[in-house]
Image (tube, coloured by chain):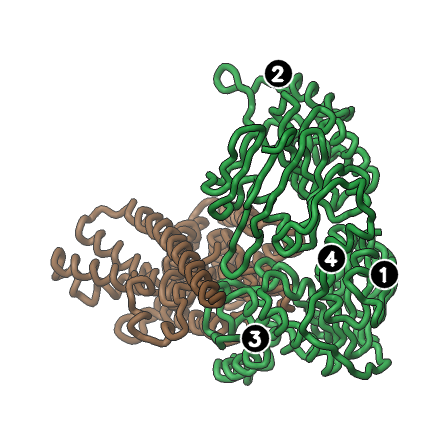
């Protein structure tokens, strides 16, 4: 999946005006339109801090964390469809060890994170060493992990988690926000820094954009693909634990609902700000999508199918938009080369 | 229209932005004759073939007649006229399908009730069709499992599909480039059968012995113009080479310097897919060229040296450290590669020129792990200036640059790693004349600073202009080594064609 940068001229990247143009920040406009709609439709509910706080506390953090982790393999040109399975596996592993085996919560969390990391290593081996397409390898891996979670939990919710475990996610911090917001901020900052400000980010991006060119330029493409798949699995593992603590029970289908939302957010986010997979675009996309879902929920009171519709649409529109932009840029580049050639031959 | 001609074209010109590829070319193919179309790379012969097959459109004024009726080359729909049959160099077969299925792909399957393929009919037709070409192998085996000579027959059969009356035009576009001698013999037998049925055949090849073996007539193109045309029997091999080569490249001056004896690159008994037992030593500051036709092993040499492709056997050492089969470690050992086919193997096209230049050595631009945009920009600006990127446009998207600037940027990327050995594959592929001489200056400058240079090129003039020594590869073997004044276009072409 290649996404060509929307900016083409040398001075456009610096101007704030073009950064906020509809082509680069369309979700800001979508959000504004939605905001206005709900402000008129359900003013009392929409203008209450409680509404937005509940989005932040309940639905926002976990999909945002998964999506931020997913940015890394997508940037390197690899899909990771196993993230939902990894979340479920780490959720069930941690809650099973705590409730059924009476382990301390920290030991259980460490083991769950280790399980997630092992999943990432397996993905890496399948994709890099054996050479299975990442889409296929992680699809299979995800299914196996879901089965593992189902088997370990016996198909039942694991309840009876201690309060100190639940508080890892639910403890109140400022403005009534829960502790899990902190984890998102920390993970997002780390991924953002590595992607945008270290050579690793460049290597990942070069690998994703043209693997063979990157390899011949000396980039260890296999190493970075491997590392990217480990990262997304590890982050998904953390998200699984946070979700379990937030809900207060271990569920074998913890990850399921987050697969579509994270892909939708990452792809929609990739059309924002940078024209490629990026952390802030992704987080903004998660926020906008979930806020709008919340608004419609409050206004219509029927919501079971809403998430799916929103995220499905977002995914298709996002990828469609990037294809259109790509085609436009290819046309512009061709025209530019033609005029240069004409100027050169005069 | 000339009597007995299958195809007669005249005044065919083709102008690309900034370049005239064909200049008022006349070309006649007679019935029952094989006509060799000859010329060096860039002479215009592939452009002419592409115009005949509808891939390119000719400029206004081109006239063409095929089998007595007018053929429109100018406004063309982009489709090949059904009376022109083409066999391409890469054969274009689907390996997992069998011969019958490959045959049917081009024209569509014969279907019956509910769209069911009528296999018995397909099989019978294919049997009959292959029999006319003298094919005896099992048509129901997947094409990928056939011998290479049999595969080329399948490609030929497909080119001839639907050609019942025997007349018409067959174009063989370098079909023998990667064939063994036995395959070529088998192919030629079939081609002679077709010719004897009264067809006109255009044969494009770099191999002159094949031209003398199969062709009746010839046309030589040089710089987009026809320089000679006639019957092959009136021609000697030497005369033909002189016609193809024409003049040598001029205007970049001589390059005198003292070479040290210090070896920087030692190739010992190197084997690849085609390459066999190559031994070669490159000294510091020396420019060593490799010449050879398609299929001679020249194309795979850069990848083998750099460790990008698996070596079948042999060692490559850089300054006495043997390099592994891994580009990253080859670079650490002091080798860099500027690959051919920039778009596929060289550039990250949708990223900026800056990101492309800095990619090979980003660690030097970091402070405490953080990539410094300031350091990067000044470093890239310095290199853009050194390689004469004009205009200096490091924030532009790489794909929007001209071919010459793209190539300069990739050379900058490689030189930035301060290599002891720089391998360049087709260093001036797809660049204009001005950029060409700038790139030659860069190559000489790098050599003057002590880098050992390996230049693989299909352009003989390029090797003459640049190299201290030229190794000629023929069918995987180094057959000759030219030095100093012996390096001429004629000698390179002559040796390559052995």
Please tell me which residue lies in front, B165 or B305: B165
Instruction: Place residue A248 in its image quadrant.
Output: bottom left
What is the spatial separation of the Cα atoms under label 4 and label 3, in whole angstroms?
40 Å
Quarter of the view holding residue B412: bottom right
Q: CA distance from mark 2 to mark 3?
A: 60 Å
For the residues marked 4 and 1, what is the alpha-carbon distance in whole angstroms? 28 Å
In the picture, the disc for residue B278 is 1
The answer to whether tags 4 and 3 share a subunit is: yes
Q: CA distance from mark 2 to mark 1?
A: 52 Å
Q: Which class describes the residues within 10 Å of circle 2: few (<14), some (14-19), or many (20+)?
A: few
Do circles 4 and 1 both sit on a common chain?
yes
Q: CA distance from mark 4 to mark 2?
A: 51 Å
Q: Nearer the viewer, mark 1 or mark 3?
A: 1
Q: CA distance from mark 1 to mark 3?
A: 33 Å
Decide: is B27 above or below B370: above
User: The chain coloured green carries which letter?
Assistant: B
- Do the residues under discs 4 and 2 have CB atoms within 8 angstroms? no
Q: Colour of chain A?
A: brown
Which residue is located at x 61 percent, y 34 percent? Answer: B7
Position of the N terminus of chain B by quadrant: top right
Have a look at marks 2 and 1 and say if they share a chain: yes
- Residue corresponding to mark 2: B121
Earlier-in-chain disc, 2 versus 3? 2
Residue that badge 3 annotates: B358
Pick the front one: A208 or A65: A208
Q: What residue sits 43% from the left and 73% below the top?
A: A189
Q: Position of residue A108 (x, y in %)?
A: 52, 63
Q: Are marks 4 and 3 in contact (CB under 8 Å)?
A: no
Comparing B114 with A90, the one in front is B114
């Amino acid at each position: 999946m290649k996404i060509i940068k929307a900016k083409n001229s040398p001075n456009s990247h610096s101007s704030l005006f073009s950064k906020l143009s509809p082509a680069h920040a369309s979700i800001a406009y979508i959000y504004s339109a939605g905001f206005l709609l709900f402000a008129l439709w359900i003013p009392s509910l929409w203008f209450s801090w409680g509404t937005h706080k509940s989005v932040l506390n309940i639905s926002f953090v976990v999909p945002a964390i998964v999506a931020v982790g997913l940015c890394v393999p997508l940037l390197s040109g690899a899909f990771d469809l196993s993230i939902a399975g990894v979340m479920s596996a780490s959720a069930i592993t941690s809650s099973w060890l705590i409730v059924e085996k009476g382990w301390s919560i920290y030991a259980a969390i460490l083991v769950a994170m280790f399980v997630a990391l092992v999943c990432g290593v397996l993905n890496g081996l399948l994709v890099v060493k054996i050479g299975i397409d990442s889409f296929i390898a992680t699809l299979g891996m995800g299914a196996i992990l879901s089965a593992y979670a189902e088997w370990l939990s016996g198909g039942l919710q694991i309840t009876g988690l201690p309060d100190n475990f639940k508080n890892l996610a639910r403890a109140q911090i400022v403005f009534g926000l829960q502790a899990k917001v902190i984890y998102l901020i920390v993970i997002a900052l780390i991924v953002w820094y590595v992607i945008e400000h270290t050579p690793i980010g460049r290597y990942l991006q070069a690998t994703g954009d043209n693997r063979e060119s990157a390899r011949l330029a000396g980039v260890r493409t296999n190493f970075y693909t491997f590392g990217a798949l480990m990262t997304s699995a590890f982050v998904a593992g953390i998200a699984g634990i946070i979700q379990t603590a937030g809900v207060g029970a271990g569920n074998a289908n913890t990850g399921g609902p987050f697969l579509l939302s994270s892909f939708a957010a990452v792809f929609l986010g990739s059309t924002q700000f940078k024209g490629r997979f990026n952390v802030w675009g992704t987080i903004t996309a998660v926020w906008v999508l979930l806020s709008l879902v919340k608004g419609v929920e409050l206004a219509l009171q029927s919501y079971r199918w809403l998430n799916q519709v929103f995220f499905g649409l977002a995914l298709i529109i996002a990828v469609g938009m990037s294809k259109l932009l790509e085609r436009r840029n290819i046309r512009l580049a061709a025209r530019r080369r033609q005029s240069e050639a004409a100027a050169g031959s005069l | 229209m000339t009597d007995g001609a299958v195809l007669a074209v005249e005044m065919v010109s083709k102008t690309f932005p900034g370049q005239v590829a064909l200049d008022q070319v006349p070309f006649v193919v007679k019935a029952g004759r094989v006509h060799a179309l000859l010329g060096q790379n860039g002479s215009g012969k592939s452009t002419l073939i592409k115009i005949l097959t509808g891939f390119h459109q000719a400029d206004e004024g081109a006239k063409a007649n095929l089998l007595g009726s007018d053929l429109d080359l100018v406004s063309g729909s982009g489709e090949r006229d059904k009376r022109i049959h083409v066999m391409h160099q890469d054969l274009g077969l689907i390996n997992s399908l069998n011969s019958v299925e490959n045959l049917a792909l081009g024209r569509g399957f014969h279907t019956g009730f509910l769209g069911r393929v009528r296999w018995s009919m397909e099989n019978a037709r294919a049997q009959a069709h292959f029999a006319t070409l003298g094919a005896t192998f099992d048509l129901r085996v997947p094409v990928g499992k056939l011998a290479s000579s049999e595969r080329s027959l399948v490609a030929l059969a497909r080119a001839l599909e639907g050609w019942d009356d025997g007349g018409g035009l067959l174009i063989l576009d370098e079909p023998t480039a990667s064939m063994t001698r036995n395959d070529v013999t088998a192919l030629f037998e079939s081609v002679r059968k077709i010719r004897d049925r009264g067809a006109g055949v255009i044969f494009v090849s770099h191999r002159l012995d094949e031209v003398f073996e199969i062709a009746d007539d010839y046309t030589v193109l040089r710089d987009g113009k026809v320089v000679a045309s006639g019957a092959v029997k009136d021609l000697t091999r030497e005369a033909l080479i002189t016609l193809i080569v024409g003049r040598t490249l001029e205007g970049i001056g001589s390059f005198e310097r003292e070479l040290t004896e210090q070896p920087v690159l030692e190739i010992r008994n190197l084997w690849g897919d085609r390459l066999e037992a190559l031994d070669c030593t490159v000294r510091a500051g020396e420019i060593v060229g490799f010449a050879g036709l398609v299929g001679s092993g020249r194309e795979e040499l850069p990848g083998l040296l750099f460790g990008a492709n698996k070596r079948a056997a042999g060692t490559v050492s850089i300054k006495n450290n043997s390099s592994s089969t891994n580009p990253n470690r080859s670079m650490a050992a002091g080798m860099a590669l500027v690959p051919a086919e920039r778009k596929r193997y060289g550039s990250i096209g949708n990223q900026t020129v800056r990101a492309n230049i800095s990619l090979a050595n980003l660690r030097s631009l970091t402070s405490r792990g953080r990539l410094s945009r300031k350091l990067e920009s000044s470093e890239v600006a310095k290199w853009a200036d050194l390689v004469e990127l004009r205009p200096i446009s490091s924030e532009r998207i790489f794909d929007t640059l001209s071919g010459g600037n793209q190539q300069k940027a990739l050379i900058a990327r490689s030189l930035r790693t301060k290599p002891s050995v720089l391998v360049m594959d087709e260093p001036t592929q797809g660049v204009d004349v001005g950029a060409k001489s700038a790139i030659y200056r860069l190559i000489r400058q790098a050599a003057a600073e002590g880098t050992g240079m390996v230049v693989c090129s299909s352009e003989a003039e390029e090797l003459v202009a640049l190299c201290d020594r030229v190794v000629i590869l023929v069918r995987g073997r180094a057959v000759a080594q030219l030095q100093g004044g012996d390096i001429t276009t004629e000698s390179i072409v002559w040796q390559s064609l052995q």
